Image (cartoon, rainbow, N blue to C red):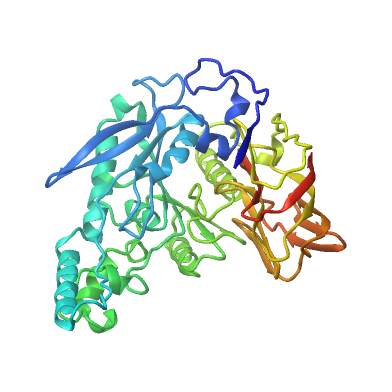
């Protein structure tokens, strides 16, 4: 493979606390997630057995220990069994950009009770391993332990407010998925000294008596195959660990949900219960968002994460936990100074074009293509979580990005003949043309296509000429 390394004219970085030459360089979620140089510090807040639990934090520019800043405490998801504080690095940096101190909590993780039979082993051996796995789950951390951990983290932050530069009465917890459950717990179940002032659950799990309940509440005699409603002891414990059944009136809530989330109406029901209890609460459901819509580099486009952060920001400004207007921008609002590649030679190998920063988010790639009679591979790719891929074969095509997918026979490029192919990326739609064929794919969330690397002709062995790139 021949790699064409593009040398692009980028502004030199000046020596500042965040590594940028001007404020505009930190204007987007992508900038915060990939390029921001603010340091992340690590504190140890608790030791359980031989494991020390950490609090990660990011301080704003001009931070002083005597400050009385808002603490934005981010809690990662992962089904109570996975994840770590680094999942919220971008979010901590956003908090620091807004003048708050950003925190991300580590908590103990549960082990899975699930065991899949090994077909190479005997039934007795599989039964033995299944029992051992179940016992490991029983002996390991529980949901109650995880709530205890985040409560202790809040106590630590509040106790050390004078050295952390925060106001102990301006603690905001924001969490995703399992982290949303823990966030809601800090506004409901938690003891008063461990309760936050504002809780913002995203993809909120609030009821452990249904759905997740039978899997995550520690076993009692009726555990195997028995509904929780038929097991009063487990039902009582399940309710005790469910924010839905422990609502207090002294914590403000912003409940955020995705209409495409498999949680369906659970966040809606939690919001309604909070509202009926007289809690200061607001609710928003994003029409195209799936589960974990606030997580960087997972299921959400930059635009969805941006909208969520701006909604959180506005909620906190309204309650005087943040000041002024957020400088965060959507990628389409920032004029890219990065040049698109220029390459006029014919080629039949794989070509890669790279930049030090992302190429413009919307552009058209066009080329003359001559494919073999039988072929399968990638004609065009913007590499990375926020890019896109255009695969083709002699039976059809497949365009995919985070929130966009079209595959099938909409475009069939004939082999052994020259065909003009173009892929046009815009905020409204993706348009693909091949000769007299054309297809459009709606860009429902106006997602931008962001990458530092463009790949052409991967695995196709096509002949390509007249390759051109143009901004949209």
Instruction: Farthest residue to the right: give it.
Output: 436
State the residue at coordinates (56%, 46%).
Answer: 384
Determine the image quadrant of residue 351: top right
Query: What residue is drawn where x is 22% and y is 38%?
Result: 45
Q: Is residue 423 above or below residue 245?
A: above
Left or right, 103 with reference to 218:
right
The location of residue 224, given as percent across then percent down, is: 22, 81
Measured along the vertical axis of the image, is residue 397 above or below residue 383? below
Looking at the image, the residue that sits furthest to the top is 15
Q: Position of residue 115 (x, y in %)?
A: 25, 72
> Residue at horizontal 14%, vertical 63%?
139
Question: Whole-percent x and y of residue 17?
Answer: 47, 20
Query: How many numbered discs?
Result: 0
Image quarter in which the N terminus is found? top right
Question: Which quarter of the rendered picture does the C terminus lie within?
Answer: top right
| Residue 462 seen by the camera | yes
In the figure, is residue 141 to the left or right of 195?
left
- Tell which of 278 and 175 is nearer to you: 175
Looking at the image, residue 371 lies above or below residue 381: below
Q: Nearer the viewer, residue 336 or 455?
A: 455
The one of 383 and 393 positioned closer to us in this rendering: 393
- Residue occupying the point 78% across, 61% down: 416
Q: Is residue 310 left or right of residue 362?
A: left
| Residue 449 point in image, percent of width and height | 65, 46
| Residue 365 seen in render | no
């Amino acid at each position: 493979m021949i790699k064409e390394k593009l040398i692009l004219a980028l502004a030199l970085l000046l020596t500042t606390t965040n590594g940028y030459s001007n404020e505009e360089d930190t204007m987007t979620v992508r900038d915060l997630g990939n390029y921001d140089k603010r340091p992340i510090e690590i504190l140890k807040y608790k030791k359980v057995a031989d494991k020390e639990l950490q609090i990660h934090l990011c301080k704003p520019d001009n931070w002083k220990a005597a400050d009385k800043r808002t603490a934005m405490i981010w809690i990662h998801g992962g089904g109570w069994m996975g994840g770590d504080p680094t999942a919220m690095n971008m979010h901590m940096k956003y908090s620091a950009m807004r003048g708050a101190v950003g925190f991300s909590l580590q908590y103990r993780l549960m082990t899975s009770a699930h065991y899949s039979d090994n077909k190479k082993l005997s039934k007795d051996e599989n039964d033995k391993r299944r029992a051992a796995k179940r016992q490991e789950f029983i002996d390991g951390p529980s949901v109650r332990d995880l709530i205890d951990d985040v409560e202790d983290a809040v106590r630590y932050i509040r106790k050390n407010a004078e050295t952390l530069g925060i106001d102990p009465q301006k603690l905001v917890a924001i969490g995703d998925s399992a982290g949303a459950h823990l966030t809601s717990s800090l506004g409901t179940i938690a003891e008063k000294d461990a309760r936050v002032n504002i809780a913002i659950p995203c993809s909120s799990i609030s009821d452990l008596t249904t759905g997740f309940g039978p899997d995550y509440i520690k076993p009692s005699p009726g555990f195997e195959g028995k509904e929780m409603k038929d097991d009063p002891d487990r039902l009582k414990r399940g309710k005790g660990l469910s924010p839905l059944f422990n609502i207090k009136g002294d914590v403000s809530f912003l409940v955020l949900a995705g209409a495409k989330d498999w949680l369906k109406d659970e966040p809606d029901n939690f919001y309604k219960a909070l509202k009926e209890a007289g809690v200061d609460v607001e609710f928003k459901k994003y029409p195209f968002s799936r589960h974990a819509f606030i997580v960087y580099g997972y299921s959400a486009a930059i635009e969805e994460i941006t909208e969520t952060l701006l909604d959180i920001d506005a909620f906190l400004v309204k309650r005087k936990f943040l000041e002024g207007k957020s400088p965060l921008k959507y990628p389409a609002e920032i004029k890219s100074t990065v040049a698109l590649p220029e390459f006029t030679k014919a080629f039949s190998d794989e070509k890669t074009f790279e930049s030090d920063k992302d190429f413009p988010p919307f552009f058209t790639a066009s080329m003359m293509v001559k494919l073999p009679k039988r072929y399968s591979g990638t004609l065009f790719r913007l590499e990375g979580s926020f890019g896109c891929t255009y695969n083709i074969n002699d039976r059809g095509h497949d365009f995919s990005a985070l929130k966009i997918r079209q595959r099938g026979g909409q475009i069939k490029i004939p082999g052994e003949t020259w065909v003009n192919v173009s892929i046009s990326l815009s905020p409204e739609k993706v348009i693909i043309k091949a000769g007299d064929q054309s297809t459009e794919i709606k860009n429902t969330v106006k997602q931008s296509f962001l990458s530092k690397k463009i790949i052409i002709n991967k695995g196709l062995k096509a002949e390509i000429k007249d390759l051109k790139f143009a901004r949209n």
